[in-house]
Image (tube, grey):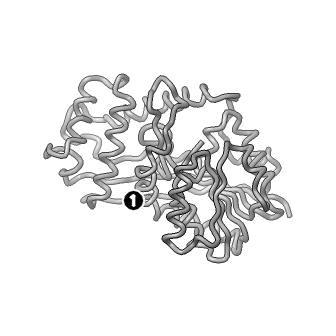
Amino acid sequence: MAHEHKHDHGRDHDHGQDQKPGRDRHDHTALDWAVMGPLLESQAELFAPLYERAMAWLAKEQTDPGLIVDVGSGPGVVACLFAETFPGARVDAVDGSEPLLERARARADRQGFGDRFGTLTGELPEVLAELEYPADLLWASRSLHHLGDQRAGLAAFAARLAPGGTLAIMEGGLPSRFLPRDFGIGRPGVEARIDAIEAEWFAQMRADLPGAVTETEDWPALLASAGLKHTGSRSFLLDLPAPAPDRVRAYAASWLTRVRDTYGEALDADDRAALDRLVDPQDPAGVHRRADVFVLAAHTVHTAVRAG
């Protein structure tokens, strides 16, 4: 269950700290987080402005948290942003992947937060019982949807809150975009067609999880059902317009490559050919060279508070 505020499938539903497509599209639970560590880091770094705005919003509710827990932290980019944003807080990064947590600890040490940064390895939500103290702020960015029973997962998250503590989950938002609808290769609208394939992949990933429960994803209602109060939701935008710098181009190329490799069988021949050209570093029409590459993404954060 490693998650770095990510996308689970191809490019979106987890563009953030991290989208994580499966290694084998027929095995929706076979996700190799450790191999994806560098990609998850680069994605989260790119999305840092979005996370910073979300944290500024959270800081209005939690002005001086003692303990912040990042549930499904992946390689720790966002956990370290929390440490920077809340200099008085201890931050615990929780994930199922020890290799990703090793990256998180190294990042915290490099950035000077090592003395107030901890990690906890184990499966969610059970591992949360091992937290030494209740959390004043518990953040779960696109980690909840990796649990078969999301309602039970939220209850487990809520149980680890201190009185007056805030639970913040990042789920939902809008599919990300990198290119104009018609970018001059193949049939216009390829990103919308990829969205549809990703939605099917995501539904199958959820259905294949152990103990999978179908749930209406009304997050404020689910937070309230966990006994929490004062629910709120807000969406945050990442807008990196064209012409894109090299790191944005590299990110777009990495994700389009993963989309092609993950969904190749589901795409028609024209769309596969278009993706082949887009990720080819030597093709003038590829994302490494073209002038119209951008990133536009929106992620939604839902919050609620444990009664004091």
x and y, in percent, of residue 123 in the image: 67, 42
Drawn side of residue 29 relative to residue 62, left or right: left
- Identity, as a three-letter code, of the amino acid under mark 1: Asp
User: Extreme right residue here?
Assistant: 308
Q: Name the quadrant containing residue 79.
A: bottom right
Drawn side of residue 265 relative to residue 25, left or right: left
x and y, in percent, of residue 303 in the image: 68, 56
Viewer-side residue, 141 vs 305: 141
Residue found 33% across the figure and 33% down from its top: 260
Task: Reply above or below: 184 against 81.
Answer: above
Drawn side of residue 177 relative to residue 129, left or right: left
Viewer-side residue, 35 vs 281: 35
Where, quadrant-wise, is the C terminus in this rendering? Answer: bottom right
Viewer-side residue, 256 vs 36: 36
User: Extreme bottom residue here?
Assistant: 88
Residue found 79% across the figure and 46% down from its top: 226
x and y, in percent, of residue 29 in the image: 55, 31
Q: Report the number of discs.
A: 1
Label 1 SS: strand
Q: Name the quadrant containing residue 65.
A: bottom right
Residue found 54% across the figure and 67% down from its top: 108
Where, quadrant-wise, is the N terminus in this rendering? Answer: top right
x and y, in percent, of residue 265 in the image: 35, 22
Residue beneath disc 1: 239
Q: Name the quadrant containing residue 240.
A: bottom left
